[in-house]
Image: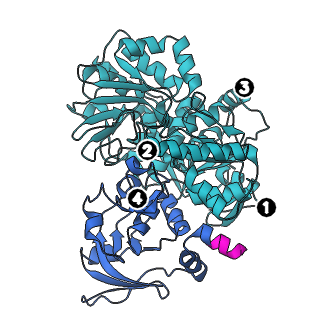
């Protein structure tokens, strides 16, 4: 499981109201939610990003509400994965259940700036920052069963595939 | 080895003889909760997985309380999905508008959640029920779907942080001030992944309303659950509501705690959480002159009768300041009726307050109290993130009912002693 993309940097305690404001929760349509992804943290975010880009954040990413609309919005906006120093627990669970890959790295945030490009190897558990000399920051790899779940598109799709 | 109350309840819902922090367990669920925002996703997931029948129609609660009474066509459609599913599956605990209340006030009030239960809810404030001595935690819609299907959910057993409250609370100080103070001390991720167990001399005399408020906000410190060891105060509350047997658990004296936090409540003054984090807490004496546009009294945090009594006591014979919108929302129909009987509603109306229906709408900027850019609100709710109550350029200040009521009268953030 490998990801390569430009990074968008956010600070500590990015809450679910910033990721997808409650005023848009009258729907769970991924396309509509994606159009408002990170709107209250950066109103231009969706216009600026390219498919495959990566969010890099500080501590406690996804704190606040239990809304699954948050990982749905990030995934549908085209973000390939999130790398944060730490995650709020409900978001952590929801991200995997929705099939959004997330990684924990305590070192990356301090060593990178907006718009730099990185390569994440989820099997080996390494991050390479392109054109920077940083080529093997370690992250905890995603175990095979979780890779399979993410590959299937989240927990429920994974379960229905197993039932077939 | 001894276990904490959280570990014991989790253990009792598995086939294991003991559990310990870090252990992954599959546990049986007593009540699984969803609302009009989170249940539609769970219902779709339930159906997509081939689910035909829920595991137990008595153990699921579907509460349309967020964007109700329906605020627009889209939210009406979401409620319709929930209603049709509840009908089809003959869900016992479905409450229609007119009977419904805010989920975390309604479920304890109706005795649907009880001491010793294991409760999951697709709503982060599900942790409220820890006040009854239950294990209760918020999950996502997918976890709710899995629970509706199988009656089970997996957990990682959390470490427990013990918070010992001692000393006597100052006048006007309530459960809201205690929990805001604690969140201010440990930060919004100070209890991340952990259980918060509240104990100590002060707790022995703390009423259920204050306990519910405290447990409600442990998620704002990142906790998995908050919990009180049940006692006679709990028993008096649940005895008149329970329609099934319940069980009291206690922590063993040799249970292991990851951390112990000692808090002298006698030193705590009325608290206000400034924008944009619930941990950004100041004592009322350090607030300064903060003019406000709106006051919200209500929510799953502070919309109970005890909160309305405090607010009415302060508002009696007074009026909201000019240009200040005062909105009071009793959390359930039963609370509404009690407030009517006690004459509180007349006090609110005479103070130029508008009375809203039991709804979560205002708290999350959904409807019935949305803020414009640059506006400031004092709210007895639980979150003050950017854009929480409306425009991203608006501000929310969190406080208890005493500050909310006094601030409405003075048009700036103030405590009742300033009146």
A163 in the magenta segment: yes
* Residue B182: numbered disc: 2
Label 2 secondary element? helix
Chain ID at mark 3: B
Q: CA distance from mark 3 to mark 4?
A: 44 Å
In the figure, what tint was chain A given? Answer: blue
B183 in the magenta segment: no
- The C terminus of chain A, quarter of image: bottom right
Front position in the image: B344 or A4? A4
Confirm whether circles 2 and 1 share one chain.
Answer: yes
Q: Are marks 3 and 4 in contact (CB under 8 Å)?
A: no
Magenta segment boundaries in residue numbering: A158-164
Q: Are marks 4 and 1 in contact (CB under 8 Å)?
A: no
Label 1 secondary element? loop
- In the displayed structure image, the side of residue A116 where residue B73 appears, left or right: right
Label 3 secondary element? loop
Q: Are marks 2 and 3 in contact (CB under 8 Å)?
A: no
Q: Main secondary structure of the magenta part?
A: helix
Residue placed under numbered mark 4 in the picture: A33
Q: Which residue does the image show at 55% across and 58% down from the upper left? A: B258
């Amino acid at each position: 499981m490998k990801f390569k993309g430009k990074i968008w940097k956010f600070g500590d305690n990015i809450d679910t109201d910033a990721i997808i404001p409650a005023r848009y929760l009258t729907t769970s349509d991924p396309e509509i939610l994606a159009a408002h992804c990170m709107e209250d943290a950066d109103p231009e975010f969706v216009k600026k990003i390219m498919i495959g880009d990566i969010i890099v954040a500080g501590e406690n990413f996804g704190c606040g509400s239990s809304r699954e609309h948050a990982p749905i919005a990030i995934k549908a906006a085209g973000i390939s994965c999130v790398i944060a120093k730490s995650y709020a627990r409900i978001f952590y669970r929801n991200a995997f259940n929705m099939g959004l890959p997330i990684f924990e790295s305590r070192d990356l945030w301090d060593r990178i700036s907006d718009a730099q490009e990185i390569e994440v190897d989820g099997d080996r558990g390494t991050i390479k920052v392109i054109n920077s000399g940083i080529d093997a920051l370690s992250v905890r790899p995603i175990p095979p069963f979780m890779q399979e779940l993410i590959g299937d598109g989240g927990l429920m799709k994974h379960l229905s595939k197993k039932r077939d | 080895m001894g276990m904490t109350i959280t570990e014991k309840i989790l253990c009792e819902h598995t086939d294991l003889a003991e559990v310990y922090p870090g252990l992954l367990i599959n546990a049986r669920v007593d009540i699984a909760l969803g609302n009009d925002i989170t249940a539609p996703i769970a219902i779709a997931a339930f159906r997509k997985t081939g689910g035909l029948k829920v595991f137990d129609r008595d153990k699921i609660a579907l509460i349309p309380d967020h964007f109700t009474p329906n605020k627009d066509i889209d939210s009406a459609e979401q409620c319709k999905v929930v209603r049709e599913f509840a009908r089809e599956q003959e869900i016992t605990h479905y409450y229609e508008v007119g009977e419904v209340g805010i989920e975390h006030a309604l479920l304890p009030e109706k005795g649907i959640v009880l001491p010793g239960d294991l409760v999951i809810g697709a709503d982060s404030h599900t942790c409220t029920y820890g006040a009854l001595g239950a294990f209760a935690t918020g999950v996502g819609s997918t976890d709710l779907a899995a629970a509706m299907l199988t009656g089970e959910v997996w957990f990682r057993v959390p470490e427990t942080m013990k918070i010992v409250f001692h000393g006597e609370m100052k006048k006007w100080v309530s459960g809201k001030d205690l929990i805001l103070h604690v969140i201010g001390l440990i930060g919004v991720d100070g209890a991340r992944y952990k259980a918060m167990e509240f104990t100590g001399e002060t707790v022995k005399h703390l009423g259920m309303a204050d306990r519910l408020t405290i447990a409600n906000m442990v998620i704002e410190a990142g906790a998995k659950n908050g919990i009180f060891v049940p006692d006679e105060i709990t028993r008096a509350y649940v005895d008149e509501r329970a329609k099934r047997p319940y069980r009291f658990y206690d922590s063993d004296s040799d249970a292991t705690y990851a951390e112990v936090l000692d808090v002298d409540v006698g030193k705590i003054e009325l608290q206000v959480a400034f924008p944009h984090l619930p941990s950004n807490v100041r004592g009322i004496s350090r607030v300064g002159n903060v003019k406000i546009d709106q006051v919200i009294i209500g929510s799953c945090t502070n919309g109970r009768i005890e909160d309305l009594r405090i607010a009415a006591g302060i508002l009696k014979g007074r009026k909201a300041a000019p240009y200040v919108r005062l909105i009071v929302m009793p959390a359930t129909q039963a609370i509404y009726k009690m407030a009517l009987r006690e004459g509180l509603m007349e006090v609110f109306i005479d103070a130029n307050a508008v009375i809203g229906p039991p709804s979560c709408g205002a708290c999350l900027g959904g409807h019935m109290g949305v803020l414009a850019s640059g506006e400031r609100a004092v709210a007895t709710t639980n979150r003050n993130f950017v854009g929480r109550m409306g425009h991203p350029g608006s501000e929310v200040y969190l406080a208890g009912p005493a500050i909310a009521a006094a601030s409405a009268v003075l048009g700036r953030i103030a405590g009742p002693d300033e009146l």
